[in-house]
Image (tube, coloured by chain):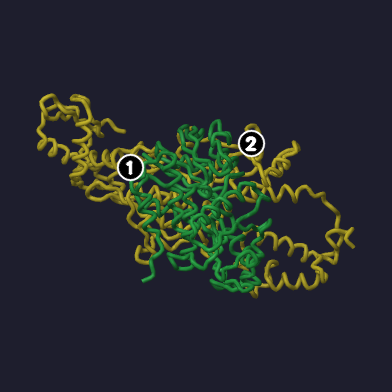
Chain colours: A green, B yellow
Amino acid sequence: MQSLVIVAHGSHLNPESSAPTYDHADTIRATGALDEVRTGFWKEEPHFREVLRTVEGDEIYVVPLFISEGYFTEQVIPRELRLAGWDVSEWDSDGLSADQATLVAEDIDREVHYCGPVGTHRAMTDVIVRRAESVTDDPDVGDDFGLAVVGHGTERNENSAKAIEYHADRIAERDRFDEVKALYMDEDPEVDDLPEFFESDDVVLVPLFIADGYHTQEDIPEDVGLCEDHTEGYDVPTEVDGTRIWYAGAVGTEPLMADVVLERAADAGADLGSALDDVRETTRVATGD
Amino acid sequence: MSDQPQAADSADAADADGPEVPVIDLPGDAFDAVLDALDDRDPDEPLRFEGFSVARDDDGGYVLADGGRPEPLTERELHEALSERAAAVTDWYAFERVVGEFGPRRAFLRWIEDADGETVATRYAALAEGIERAWGELKITATITDRGERRYDLRHADDAGVPVDDLETHEDPLGARELVTLDEKGRYRPLKTAPSLAGGWVFPDLGPRDLYETVETIYPATVANWHREREGELDVTHWRETMERQSGIYGVVKTWDRGEGYEHVNWVAEACCDDSQCLKRREWQYDEDTDLDVDGGDGAFPCREPCSVVVSAARKWTRLESEQPRTYEFELTPSEKEQVEDIIDAVADGRTDEIREADTKEGANRYRARFLRAKRFDDEGNLGGVPTDPDAE
C-alpha cells in the first residue's frame, strides 16, 4: 500500500497558507495512483510530529512542499518526523540535487522515503512557465514577453537563490521568452527595480513561493509598485515605468504543482501508473477558443 | 465476545424486555467474502464468527460448528446456514473486510458500538435504535441497515435533534475541511481542537471508513493518539523536552526554563490548554517527574505534547517575561480598578462580543472602556499619564 504525505508550513494566522497543499493533495487523490494521500504541517494539524501515525501504508513517500533546501527540509522536518539517523549528507546534495533518503521514522517504526523539496525539482521549471501561461491566459506566452522569477535572496538561505537561478537558467535555455531574469527581494538584482532589468514591454513576474501570504500579497506588489498599498489591490497587468507587469502570485498555487509532488514520489520509487501524464493534462491551461 | 451461540438474526432472540434485534438479510458480498476467506485457509482451519465457526472440509464442502454436532454442508446449504446467522456474518464482514486492520480506525469504529464488550445481538439491537457517541464537539449516531451495514450521522453536538433537511448536508469527508477553517464568526481557527467548531451541517449517511476520515479531518490525529493511549502506548513529550527541541526563531523558548520552578508553565497551560480553549486532554507535564498544578481537562482524546500554538505563544512570553517588573504610580478609583479587571476577564474569556452596546453595568462595555480611556489616558496613550519607560521622558 503506497502512501503519500505532503508536508508544508501552514500558518496560525492565514488560512490561505495551507490551501495549495490541500488542492494538490486533492488533484493527486483524484488520479488514484496512491492508496492514500495525507497532509501534515508545521503550524497546523496534523503536525509533522503526528502525521505519520495517521498513515496506513507500508510504502510511504514524504514530499516537502517547500521551495528550497534549507532549514526546514534539512533540520525541522526530519527532526519532527523523527527520522532515525538523519543527516543532511543522506541527500548528498549540492543545494539543488536532493532526491530522497530512506530512513526509519521512529514514530511508527516503519521506513519512509524522505524526498527533496518540490521547489528544486526540474519539473518545477515547467510549473513556472505554466504559471506564466495561467496569468496571461495564453498557453503560448513567450514572444515579446520577459519573465522574472522572484524569490528571497541569500539573506535567509543560500540555497533559496540557487533554486531561483536554476529555474531561470533552464527557462532561458528554452528561448521561449525574450528575456528571463532572476530577481530577489533582499539583494541585487532587486525586484523593486524590475523595469530597469527588462527591455520587453510585457514582463510576467512569478514569485517562487509555495503559498500566497504576506510576501506575495503585500511585500512584492508594493515593492514593485503595482500598488501604493496592498489593500488597494492591483490590476493584471499593471504598467510600472513603461513596463506592463503581469503579476502571477505564488507559483505554488498553480495546479501543475501536483505534478512536481508526484515526480518527487516517482523519483523515490513510487509506482504511479499514468498519474504523471494525467495530472499534466488535467491541469493544463485551456487553449483559448 | 460471548461464547454463546446467538441466533441474532431472528427477532425472537431478543430479551423480552430488551430492544428488538433487527432482521438482517445476508448480502451477497458478505457471503462471497466468507467463501474467499475459506479459500485462503487450509481445510479444517476454521473461520470464526460469534457463536460458531465454518471450515472447508476435504471434499469441497463445508463444516459449520456451533457447539452441536458438525454437519457437512454444500455451498447452498452453507448459504442457508449463514443466512440464518446473518447478524454474526455481517458483523464479521463489517470489521474484517470493510473497516480493515488499520489500528486507529478499527479501534474507533469498534469503540462506537462497544464491539469488544457487547454481543452481536445486543449491538445490533442498539444500532437499530441508534448508538450515540461524543467526540470533541461532534455527535456521532451509528445505525445499521437491514443488510448489516453500519451507517453514521455526524454533526455538531449543538445540532442534536435538528432534522437533516434543516442542515447543510455533506458526503465527502474532505468536505469537512471547509467546516473547520473558520469559526461561526468567520475567524480563522489555527487550532482544530479549539471548542469553536461552527455547526449547521451534517454528514447524514457515512460508511465506516468515511466516518473515520471525516473525524480525522475535523480533529486530526486525535483518533490515532486516543488509540495509542488505549493501548498503553501514548508517547507523551513533556514541556521541558519539547522546548529543548526547538530551534531557529523558537530556540529562545528553552531559556524560559531557568530552573526556578514551573509556575510559568502552569500559566501557559491555564491560558492555552484549559477545556475552554482546547478539547484535548493535556497529558504532558513540566517534565516526567513534575506535574503541573492546573487541570488537564476532560477531553476524550489526549494531548501528548505542547502544540505549535503553545510553542509560538511561549516564544512571545519568553521575551515578555525577560522584563523586570517596575513600580508605576497612578490613580484609579475602586470602580476603575475593577473595570480594568473586568476588561481583562472579558477578553480572556472571549466575551467581548456578548456585552451589549448600552449595557454600561459591564466594565468591559465599549462606552465604559472609551470613557476610561478618555479620562485616564494622555495624548500618547499612557495610562494615568505615566510613560511606560520613565527614562524616555
Which of the pair B278/A234 is nearer the observer?
A: A234
Dot 2: within a 10 Å radius of its alpha carbon, few (fewer than 14), some, or many (20 or more) residues? some
Would residue B6 be found to the left or right of residue A191 on screen? left
Indicate left or right for A22 with B376 as reference: left
- Check the image and report above or below for B193 versus A107: below
Q: Which mark is residue B99?
A: 1
**B166 shown above or below B45:** below
Q: Earlier in the sequence, mark 2 or mark 1?
A: 1
Q: Which amino acid type is marked by label 2?
A: Glu
Amino acid type, callout 1: Val
Chain containing the residue with disc 2: B
Describe residue B323's horizontal placement relative to residue A93 as left or right: right
Label 1, residues with CA under 10 Å away: few <14, some 14-19, many ≥20: many
The tag on residue A161 is none
The residue lying at 36 percent from left, 64 percent from top is: B163
Q: Quadrant of the C terminus of chain A?
A: bottom left
Label 2's element?
helix
Q: Is residue A40 visible?
A: no
Q: Is residue B159 above or below residue B281?
A: below
Q: Quadrant of the N terminus of chain A?
A: top left
The image shows residue B365 at horizontal and vertical percentages of 67, 70
Please identify the quarter of the rendering in which residue B332 is found. Answer: bottom right
Q: Which chain does the residue under circle 1 lie in? A: B
Q: Are marks 2 and 1 in one subunit?
A: yes
Mark yes or no: residue A289 visible: yes
Across and down, in percent, residue B187 comes to: 55, 63
Q: CA distance from mark 2 to mark 1?
A: 36 Å
Q: Position of residue B41 (x, y in %)?
A: 22, 28
Residue A64 rendering spot, x and y as whole percentages: 51, 46
Residue at the (24%, 43%) spot, across then down = B14
The numbered disc on residue B241 is 2
